[in-house]
Amino acid sequence: MTSPYLSIRNLGVTFTGGTRPVRAVNDVSLDIAPGEAVALIGESGSGKSVTMRAVMRLNPEGRSRIEGRIMVGGRDVMAMDRRTLSAYRGADAAMIFQEPLLALDPVYTLGDQIIETIRRHEPITRDAARARALELFERVRIPSARSRLDNYPHEMSGGMRQRAMIALALSCRPKLLLADEPTTALDATVQMQVLLLLRELQRDLGLSILFVTHDIGAAIEVADRIAVMYAGQIVEEASARDLIRSPRHPYTLGLLKSRAHDAMVKGARLDAIPGAPPDLANLPDGCPFAPRCFLADEGCRSGGVAMQVVGPAHQARCRRLELTAAAAQDAP
């Protein structure tokens, strides 16, 4: 069996800067094989972006406590000193941020930002770095690529800025690409273009991708495998095909039912999940989804729930798997 390129084991992230500690990520374990795309989905505040930022060691060190192990390409990220960590970011793993207008430096041209990144990691001339930047702009299909290198971020549309952000992330040829909701601020047509571009780059460059989104439709387009997060935990993990066809956690089923689908009558209301996510500084006893779950019983509310194997490469954190399977069969 191929060793995972990214291996997360028992990751916990607790923010300690406020009046009460906030357990944003709780005992998360996840593997991504070389060349595999995995999506983390869930509502805002479920711990998706915090998990991703932990892989890059971007959570504030003075106000957060991180437990567990993160291995990338066989290297222990948690043991890296500042110099090693600086070399790791960009060359081994790179990140596409949610809002490129905020992530990109407004006072430097896009070309200069890519050139500087390449030369920070490699002994290469400025002309050679610019040639690679041009090649990257062409690869991500930015029109008039040569002249666009001299544009500032504000001179590009949202879709073109996102493509430039992808080019910057790929500039040092990383093997792991972390994408934090890269299509949130884009319209539907541009979203699909960016998603297809990510899938194409993954296939052509052999990238491992961790893709964070609250849009399950986007996850289906990009991912080979999907992990569903709720209240800082992974509550279900399966191939994209199995998760859509046979969800086994009530939260996953709720996410799927809350989407618009072909069987809906015009004007019908979406079947939304009731209630709101829990306070991560004051989690309830038992399953954190129990207060919102239509299948919960007293056993769900009184004790922790471990992951259970549902099938090959499919697991769910639920005591009532059979009832969830029956409810999924009845869903449109």
Image (cartoon, rainbow, N blue to C red):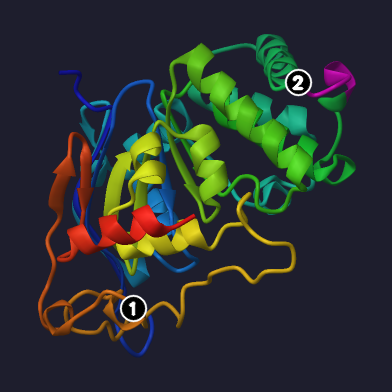
Q: Is residue 109 left or right of residue 245?
A: right
Q: Secondary structure at mark 2?
A: loop
Q: Position of residue 144 (x, y in %)?
A: 89, 19
Labels 1 and 2: the sequence-earlier one: 2
Compared to residue 117, the image places residue 214 above or below, namely below
Mark 2, Cα crowd under 10 Å, few <14 / some 14-19 / many 20+, is: some
Compared to residue 125, the image places residue 223 above or below, namely below
Which residue range is magenta in the image?
A: 141-147
Residue 59 can be seen, yes or no: no
Q: Residue at image x 28%, y 27%?
A: 5
Q: Is residue 324 left or right of residue 10?
A: right
Q: Which amino acid is tagged 1? A: Leu
Asked if labels 2 and 1 touch by Cβ distance under 8 angstroms, the answer is no
Residue 309 can be seen, yes or no: yes
Q: Residue at image x 64%, y 26%?
A: 197
Residue 280 is tagged as 1
Nearer to me, 164 or 306: 306
Q: Residue at image x 50%, y 22%?
A: 202
Q: Secondary structure at mark 1?
A: loop
Q: Which amino acid is tagged 2? A: Arg
Mark 2 — residue?
141
Q: Is residue 146 magenta?
A: yes
Nearer to me, 140 or 55: 140
Instruction: Count every numbered label the image shows and give the total.
Output: 2
Compared to residue 143, the image places residue 21 above or below, namely below
Q: Position of residue 108 (x, y in %)?
A: 77, 39
CA gap between label 1 and label 2 equals: 41 Å
